Image (cartoon, rainbow, N blue to C red):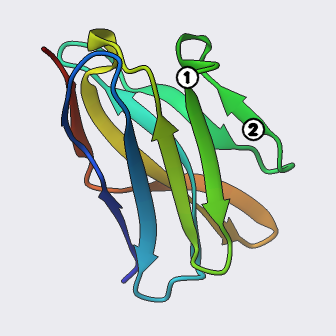
């Protein structure tokens, strides 16, 4: 069974940086990590950044200029570099994974989440 494994979360002061990683375990190339979402307490899960099927990158407006998504296709791993973190970035961050169903790519896989807390 393929699993998405996030790492890199933690506690950081405002203005600090963290880098999240997400790798697929198991039959690693059946699912591709492609993006990051987050969910703060009492709020819905929201997009942070992702690679679209066409290969472009989509960012939430709230993180543009501060967060950078990247990937290593050979390692089937996606990263999220988070700079100038703010308290409102505090959330559980989830990796999303994409799989091929017939001839259609579907983003319906999730990691277990990693906590990011921004606080002084």
Label 1 with label 2: CB-CB less than 8 Å:
no
Report helix, strand or loop for mark 2: strand
Looking at this view, is 53 or 115 the one in front?
A: 115
Tell me the crowding category of disc 1: few under 14, some 14 to 19, or many 20 or more residues within 10 angstroms, Cα based.
Answer: few
Q: Nearer the viewer, mark 1 or mark 2?
A: 1
Tell me the crowding category of disc 2: few under 14, some 14 to 19, or many 20 or more residues within 10 angstroms, Cα based.
Answer: some
Given the current orientation, which residue lies at the most extreme bottom position? 27
Residue at 30 percent across and 58 percent down: it is 7
Residue at 87 percent across and 49 percent down: it is 54
Q: Does 105 sit above or below residue 15?
A: below
Q: CA distance from mark 1 to mark 2?
A: 14 Å
Q: Quickly name the residue at label 1.
A: 66
Residue 101: x and y in percent read: 68, 69
79 sits left or right of 65 in the view: left
Residue at 63 percent across and 60 percent down: it is 71
Q: Does 17 sit above or below residue 80?
A: above
Tag on residue 57?
2
Report helix, strand or loop for mark 1: loop
Given the current orientation, which residue lies at the most extreme right position? 54
Residue 14: quadrant of the picture? top left
Q: Quadrant of the C terminus?
A: top left
């Amino acid at each position: 069974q393929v699993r998405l494994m996030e790492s890199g979360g933690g506690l950081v002061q405002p203005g600090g940086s963290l880098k999240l990683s997400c790798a697929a375990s198991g039959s690693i190339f059946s699912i591709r990590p492609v993006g990051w979402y987050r969910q703060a307490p009492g709020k819905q899960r929201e997009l942070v950044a992702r690679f679209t099927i066409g290969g472009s990158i989509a960012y939430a407006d709230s993180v543009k200029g501060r967060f950078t998504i990247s990937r290593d296709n050979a390692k089937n791993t996606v990263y999220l570099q988070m700079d100038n973190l703010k308290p409102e970035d505090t959330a559980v961050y989830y990796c999303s994974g994409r799989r091929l169903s017939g001839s259609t790519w579907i983003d319906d896989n999730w990691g277990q989440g990693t906590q990011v807390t921004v606080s002084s």
